[in-house]
Image: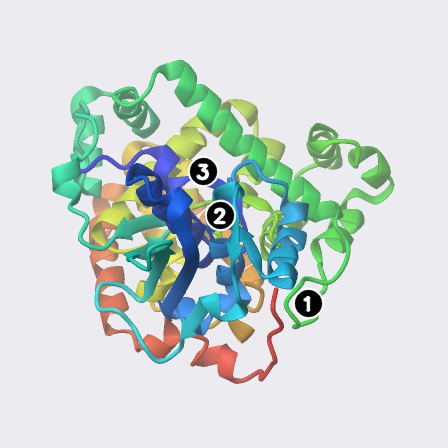
Amino acid sequence: MDFISTFDMFKVGLGPSSSHTMGPWAAARRFLEVLRSEGALDRVARARVDLFGSLAKTGKGHGTDLAVILGLCDWDPTTCDPAAVHPAVAKVRAEKLLPLAGGRAIPFEKGDVAFHLHESLPFHPNALAFTATLDDGATRAETYYSVGGGFVVQEGEDAAAKGAGPDVPFPIESAADLLAACRKSGLTIPEVVLRNERAARDEAAIRDGLARIWDVMRGSAFRGAYAEGILPGGLGVVRRAPKLNRSLLGDRAEAASRNVDAWVAAMRAGGGEFHAALKWLACFALAVNEENAAFGRVVTAPTNGAAGVIPAVLLHRVAFHEGGDEAVAPFLLTAGVVGALFKKRATISAAMGGCQAEIGVSSAMAAAGLAQTLGGTAAQALMAAEIAMEHHLGLTCDPVGGLVQVPCIERNTMGAVKAVTAAQLALEGDPERAKVSLDAVIRSMWETALDMNSKYKETSEGGLAVQIPVNVVEC
């Protein structure tokens, strides 16, 4: 049984896409490691990247070309300055020189990143191949698949041979396993997950890691709530979170702009009446995903396209409920294990499953985390996840212009609202009398993904994407 950690489901990185930006970026750095391990890095004379399937069709809008260039430069997306991304790529393109692994520059022409719009590889729609030509004319090539959420698989990689991770006290392959573990041990969901996490790292590292995730999440919401302007890419989408933020804070807006703690304090001071709390939920989700669309730093939760749902619901929990700060770790641990169930038993890749695999999964994760931290039982938390996903089944991925903007940004607000509603229903419900289990809805989601027409799976060839003709400019 494979162990998928909370820190696998939540990754710090840059927007706009986990599968089209973060995954290819990671693949490029993995290719550098292959060259290093073989002593070939210093012998590379040219490098080429071939993009296939969904990576080719929507790669321009998702910044895939930027990602592979910066990956080959060995930039770290978790620590690099987001403001330096576009200038660095512009410099490579202008000079036609690539500082391979941050060192020796090699020739690099525009055609060295090739988009194969009408060719796909069989394993997964998100495929890319790297080829290095060495100084003696020999070539070294590897193919990778970006399978969603920033996860990358190398062609021919044998996960079983590499090992499936640490032995954990509670092996969990299904929601039924998770519920059984809670009932047998008398532990809550986050307590079970924490025991498993301890098999991979010590508790101090776990707590520090969760704090880092939360810091990036709320930081992205805060920056998005104050960043004015138009999003890049050519659609002319105006950021809406700042206006909503100002209207909610009123005369507290300036004081709240000092830092994220002052911002949250100002929210609390305004009260959490239904209409205000609902508007804040929308503001949070808009803010994060507008940051994501602008190549800002976010947390894949479980993907970049759905990065706003979980921070929105968790900020809602922190700002408008008692003991909010203490809820962060159990919320994230609960949400993480629910996301892992979807990854194991279905998919978190929109190129495989449509937007139900992104917004739907993130809404289910957030619903479970909220129900758990508002006093729900393990069964109620899983019921909340089931309700949230049930009402996202069949949701297509149809990004206009291949950009993670329309309808992606607004969909995060809808996912957040559904998560809160699902948690409320579950907390008032009786899981023993529920007609649909979380395992059943995960199976249904996967079957729906398999049946869904490919044009509705992150190709921009169907749905809203074909109703609004645009000319996407290079990011």
Of residues 161 and 240, the one nearer the viewer is: 161
Dot 2 crowding, Cα within 10 Å, few <14, some 14–19, many 20+: many
Q: What percent of the width, then of the height, locates residue 435? A: 22, 54
Residue 444 placement: quadrant: bottom left
Which one is earlier in the sequence, the residue at label 2 or at label 3?
Answer: 2
Residue type (three-letter) at the residue carrying disc 2: Leu
Per the rendering, the mark at residue 169 is: none
Residue type (three-letter) at the residue carrying disc 1: Val
Q: Residue at the spot x=28%, y=41% of the render?
A: 38
Picture layout, residue 235 above or below residue 37:
below
Q: Residue at the spot x=71%, y=58% of the render?
A: 240
Q: What percent of the width, then of the height, locates residue 369? A: 41, 37
Q: How far apart are marks 2 and 3 (CA)?
A: 45 Å
Picture layout, residue 414 above or below residue 209:
below
Per the rendering, the mark at residue 370 is: 3
Residue 162 placement: quadrant: top left
**Residue picked out by circle 2:** 100
Query: Closer to the camera: disc 3 or disc 1?
Result: 1
Which one is earlier in the sequence, the residue at label 3 or at label 1?
Answer: 1
Q: How many marks?
A: 3
In what element is the residue under mark 2? helix
Q: What percent of the width, then of the height, locates residue 256? A: 79, 35
Q: What percent of the width, then of the height, locates residue 313? A: 52, 43
Residue 46 placement: quadrant: bottom left
Q: How far apart are marks 2 and 1 (CA)?
A: 35 Å
Does the image show residue 364? Answer: no
Q: Residue at the spot x=51%, y=47% of the render?
A: 73
Which one is earlier in the sequence, the residue at label 2 or at label 1?
Answer: 2
Per the rendering, the mark at residue 237 is: 1
